[in-house]
Amino acid sequence: MKTPRRLPGHLRDRPFTVVEAVASGVSKRRLRHRSLQTLGRGIRLQSTTARLPLIVRIRPFLEVNERCAASHATAAEIHGLPTRRKRQGEPEAYHVIRPEGAAQLKRAHVVVHRAKLFDDEVTFRHEVPVTTPARTWLDLAERLTIDELVAVGDACVRFPYPELEGRGEPYCSIDDLRRIVDRHNGKRGIRKARLALGLIRVGSDSPQETQLRLELVRAGLPAPQLNVQILGRDGRPGPKPDIAFVAYRVGVEYEGAHHSEQDQVMRDISRSERYADVRWSEVRISKRHMINDAKAAVAKVRTALIQAGWRPGRKTTAP
């Protein structure tokens, strides 16, 4: 077989539709060449997609299917919301949603959900239709645990760091989540969503911080505040704890894997010095404290609170 003609540059190294290939001058004979993979009816690929961004990999699957949007775990990954890690060797499947009443759709590599879908529940990322973060959160209630759903909700409503994330506003508000729950009464997972909604808080920067907060309050500790800026006696900014028990001057910091990096170690030392300056106690929690329902983390924080004057049995509020 002859060496195939090179594809146009914009079609190389990414999946594409037969329609756009033909529009770019690619012959039907070239599209049948064995050098191209068939990812489904009307979709071709010249090389692996493993290293391509998800938004690029899923684009052709939405272009060949009208009235579809990326949804569920796929939409969560596109938005940068927390998702469950895929098991090793698990084949990739793209989740898409289409409105109730639309025709059945069966495609390789695609999980199709048909459900009530309003126009304002779909947004566009790089011209690709994706369910909004609020609708994505609601759809994830079908499969996630309540704690996992709280973590996704916390990620939706948290205020981002513009210099790091390129956006200055939360994806949505708690009221937005409440409205979408009220709009879809009776939807699969709605009871779980309502329970999770009551636990979502603004200020948690990671799923680990969310899980730590939930475990602390379940253990009967006072309800904390999140990412509160502490001021020194001279009014200068002090530390900003991940979790703060302001009445007892106790701050809790969750330290992820990056805290072992040299630059971060120096920042952590500086942070500890700021705790001392404002006369607060610092409790540092890592992954090893979170196993076995975070019993070690709870014990460390409980000890710090008791030393600061808190006594078990005092009335606490919701997390």
Image (cartoon, rainbow, N blue to C red):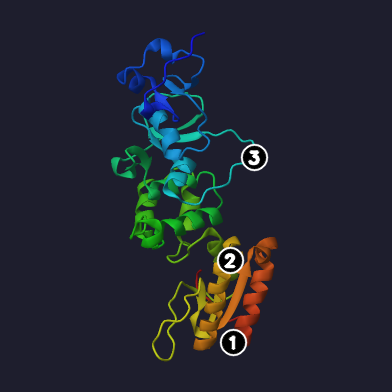
- 214 lies above or below 156: below
Calculate the distance from the C-alpha at mark 1 to the C-alpha at mark 3. Answer: 46 Å
Position in image of residue 69 (x %, y %): 38, 36
**Mark toward the start of the polypeptide (1 vs 2):** 2
The amino acid type found where label 2 is placed reads His
Name the front one of labels 1 and 2: 2
User: How many numbered circles does the render carry?
Assistant: 3
Residue under the image location 64 percent in, 63 percent down: 287
Q: Pointer 3: what residue? A: 88
Residue under the image location 51 percent in, 76 percent down: 244
The amino acid type found where label 3 is placed reads Gln
Looking at the rendered structure, the secondary structure element under dot 2 is helix
- 46 lies above or below 82: above
Dot 1 crowding, Cα within 10 Å, few <14, some 14–19, many 20+: some
| Contact between labelled residues 2 and 3, with CB atoms less than 8 Å apart | no
Position in image of residue 176 (x %, y %): 34, 55
The amino acid type found where label 1 is placed reads Ala
Q: Pointer 1: what residue? A: 308
Position in image of residue 216 (x %, y %): 59, 70
Q: Residue furthest front?
A: 3
Q: Pointer 2: what residue? A: 259
